[in-house]
Amino acid sequence: MGTIEVIKKFIESNWIIERAVREVLERLPLRFRYGISYGPSFRYWLGFLRESEKWDRDRLEAYQFEQLKDLLIHAGKNVPYYRKVFREYGFKPEKVQSLEDIKVLPYLDRTAIKGRHHEFISENIPEGKLIAATTIGTSGIPLVLYGTKETEERHWATIVNLWGRIGYTPKSRTVFFEANIRRGDRDNLPWNKYGNTLILSSNYFLNEWIEKYIEMLNNFRPEYLIGFSHTIAAFSTYIMNIGKPIFDGLKGVIVYAENVYKWQREIIKEVFGVRVFSDYGMVEKVIHGGECEHSYSCHLYPQYGFTEYLRLQDSMYELVGTGFINYAMPLIRYRTGDVCAEIETECPDCRRNYDVIHALEGRISDFLIDSDGQVISVHLNMDFSVFENIKRFQLYQECPGEVDLRIWFEDSYPDSYKDEDTNKILSEVNRSLGLHGDRIKFAVVSIDGIQPPSSEKHRMVDQQLDIKDFLNH
């Protein structure tokens, strides 16, 4: 059964869908118009999300079961990897009776996909319809994944629905910070503009271009800034340090693709005075979520996929996802590497019956190991004033109980003051992590003359140890 047919089965009449779609379809932002066209999948998915967010838990789970069973039957017929796995485990998709039945299947991770992605591609989808995407590889293992136009339509409809929680509309004037941009006929310029969208390259966070970026923003006067949390936090720090006046009229900052720390929120809010809204998703497209409009808790879309919670330690779980929107390369029971703590099944603020995560701790790699082999979550709550003279810092670990604190100082910052600021940062890291005694010994490494990478998601912790071994024991 196709996506539209499944949706129709759970919606009383088509006019509900069409009513919801008409409210936004004619106002689609140019960013989306250039990226995809809007066929039935986008229209139905957008309307479906608006209607189904009112459903009770039983109805949402009934929809998830229908989608999951349909996906499993498809994978067993058309995907070589799953044909083999289902045969080995004696698994019959047609006989699935509940969401729990999927738990007899093995988990899937990046190592199983890398180098053999062709085994995960559906044989009934023509090669010419496949759209490739590559993960950035912050975990060290970049992947090439494939979807279709329908996959992208449903994904972008989810994002349009999510961002609307904080007032974003397709008419909003928006600035995107991106590493790689389409320059069009603006050769050698790290920015582009079309319609109500301005795109600035984060690869040009140098003094000369940041000054120009500030001037461009003051002239453009956007309503929303969108980008990686570390990118916008770095930009905010620069503005705060130089003390230049900034435009008013900004309504919100949207960050995505990586964990946002409290100290980053504080820096951004201090400079721009607006809400920082986090969008949680991944190129693998197995789970998607975002913050509530009333709080910082993260809602996971039950319409997008089925999420399991693999217990690692007490009150610590790894998110495992089975995505519903990509039949070209379905990923079933995929271990995301993302870790959360407290989980609820309803938001007390907005009353959506979605899974709610109050503490998304980051990736499995965002942990440190102390001298006793204990796992420490790096969820920093620091005084952001200590970042006044630095571009970025990073925690690097190769041995339990030993961590390098890497610091990138501003280019013009005098060497005579670096020791003082280093001690402040080190003190804040220890205080924020709640470290006492010799649980972790820090060695400070000042990195001069090398620009911190801005073309990819920033890894707060560069963890070389296998954290799973410590979590499991």
Image (cartoon, grey):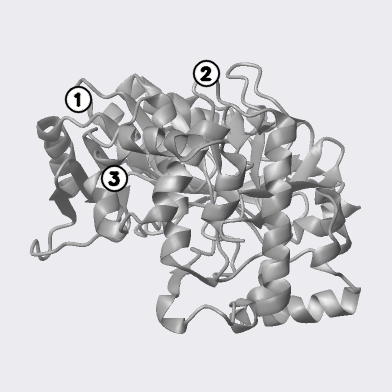
Q: Callout 2, which amino acid? A: His
Spatial separation of the CA atoms under disc 1 and disc 2: 27 Å
**What's the CA distance linking mark 2 and mark 3?**
24 Å
Relative image position of residue 257 (x, y in whole percent): 49, 48
The quadrant in which the N terminus is found is: bottom right
Residue sitting at x 60%, y 79%? 117
Q: Is residue 27 found left or right of 282 in the rendered image? A: left
Q: Amino acid at mark 3?
A: Phe
Image depth: mark 1 or mark 2 in front:
2
Q: Helix, strand or loop at disc 2?
A: loop
- Which kind of residue does numbered mark 1 sit on? Ile
Q: Nearer the viewer, residue 436 or 345?
A: 345
Q: Is residue 336 above or below residue 198?
A: below
Q: Quadrant of residue 185?
A: bottom left
Depth check: 419 or 370 in front? 370
List the residue tagged with mark 2. Answer: 294
Residue 305 visible to an observer of this rendering: yes
Which tag is nearer the camera, tag 2 or tag 3?
Answer: 2
Front-most of residues 174 and 21: 21
Q: Hey, which quadrant is residue 375 in on the image?
A: top right
Looking at the rendering, which quadrant does residue 234 occupy? top left
Q: Which residue is mark 1?
A: 246
Q: Residue at x 40, y 33 (%)?
A: 20
The image position of residue 156, as x and y in percent, is 41, 49
Residue drawn 10% across and 65% down? Answer: 187
* Disc 3, SS: strand
Q: Earlier in the sequence, mark 1 or mark 2?
A: 1
The residue that label 3 is drawn on is 176
Q: Say the numbered circle drawn on residue 324.
A: none
Q: Is residue 380 visible?
A: no
Residue at position x 84%, y 46% in the image: 311
Q: Is residue 441 left or right of residue 323?
A: right
